[in-house]
Amino acid sequence: MIKRILTIVAVVALVVTGFWGYREHRQKQALLLKAENQYQRAFHDLSSNMSLLQDELGKALAVNTQRQLTPCLSNVWRVSYTTQSDVGQLPLSLMPFNRTQEFLRDIGEFSYRVAIRDQKKEPLSNEEWKTLQSLYNESKEIEQDLQALQADVLDQNLRWMDAELALSQTRKKTDNQIVDGFKAMEKKVSGFPEIQSDTLNAVKTRMKPHINNVSGTDASVEEAAKKTAAFLGKADTTGITVQKNGQGMPYPAYSITVQEPDNQKYYLGMTVKGGYVTWLVNDREVKEAAMDMVAGQEKGEQWLTAHGYKDLSLLKAEQYDNTGIYTFSAKQDDVIIYPDTVTLKVALDNGTVTGFNGQDYLFHHKKRTLQKPELTVKQARKYVSPHTQIQEQNLALIENDLGKEVLTYEFIGTMDDDTYKIYINAQNGDEEKVEKLKQI
């Protein structure tokens, strides 16, 4: 009897296990099928959007009126970013595809910057037309490669899951037609000549940190540790670990970890050139606030002075839980210098600085010769939307989308319960920038 019961139990267990295994297999297959379908959709969208992008670039070359050029370039910008999104949905993270993605970004940035400007004041130049022509010719090559690869995928029923598996085989060479096709495309794009365009170069310059503005010789690992100890007020370099960042970073830098005796840790970034601390984070838990935001600001200002940051004015103060976030900026002749900003996190339990970001200040701060505004504040105010209720105005130096410093009137106003900063060029009344302020 017992033997019979055990046999029945074993059979039931076997059936349950088999059913569970079957269900797991079905679920796994369903997930793999879903992933494969998503990859296939993104790939075919990529091919389609690349064709559309090439068509729109061709239209931009063909039009002969500024009225038609702006919508054409706007479409180029829109489609180029859609194409980048398609690439981002493919399992290509394990292979170098940076140059192709950069090429698509360049198309988007160039077309956007030309499209948004006043074509009557600044029409498309001969140099920019040649840039468009280069982008058109090069995008045509990519389009043809994608179409050929798409034909192979459809004809031979190639699977993206196989491509993902091939990319993950790091220890051995695995041939895969999709992977080989994208590698060939990346190699071809890497061979394209660098685009020579003042507009595009200005955008790229703005996106890169101005490391050339930093003075000093390169700091060694040992010097970086000593500079870190001095920055934190430590007697020696005990507990300080310095690691040089790898290639591909915006500028040569060190990543630094500081282990304190009380188990607290500091994390810092430092430029190799000159050995300047660009940011700092302290991971300690902040307890219940024992001071208000004004007292926290005073502590932050004392910290800035002790670290050599002088003559800064508070721009913004926000409180998150038990921490105050303070943004300071340089001022010159009553003009707010926005490129020269420093941000601090101050713990309101004891007033210590738990976060610091001084990269913008480091890369931009200098004595400037400021122009006198051509417009009065009253004249500049006429360029602001009449629907905005202005609360405050200042003269401010900002960096525009092309990385050029521009003297503006900063108007802070409200509309429909939202607050905005509107920057009007103090020389010609152009609306340089509009920012919506977050509600705290």
Image: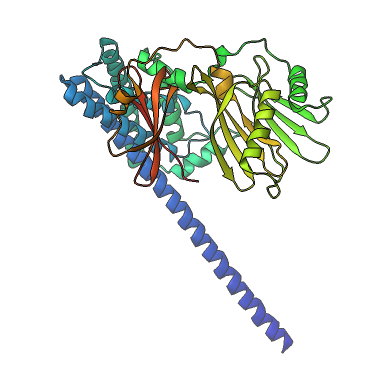
Where residue 228 appears, as percent x and y from the top left, is 74, 24
Location of residue 242 with respect to 263 vertically, above or below: above
Front residue of this view, candidates 156 and 88 = 88
Location of residue 142 with respect to 211 vertically, above or below: below
Q: Is residue 253 left or right of residue 427?
A: right
**Which residue sits at x=26%, y=25%?**
57
As drawn, which residue projects farthest toward the left?
64
Dividing the picture into quarters, in which one does residue 123 lie? top left
Quadrant that contains the N terminus? bottom right
Dividing the picture into quarters, in which one does residue 177 lie? top left
Name the colour scheme: rainbow
Where residue 437 appears, as percent x and y from the top left, is 44, 39
Dividing the picture into quarters, in which one does residue 168 lie? top right
Front residue of this view, candidates 7 and 141 = 141
Front residue of this view, candidates 57 and 179 = 57
Q: Is residue 117 left or right of residue 434?
A: left
Where residue 167 appears, as percent x and y from the top left, is 53, 36
**Which residue sits at x=76%, y=32%?**
258
As drawn, which residue projects farthest toward the bottom?
1
**Which residue sits at x=63%, y=74%?**
13
Where residue 406 appears, as percent x and y from the top left, is 40, 18
Front residue of this view, candidates 385 and 3 = 385
**Which residue sits at x=81%, y=27%?**
234
Residue 127 at least partly seen: yes
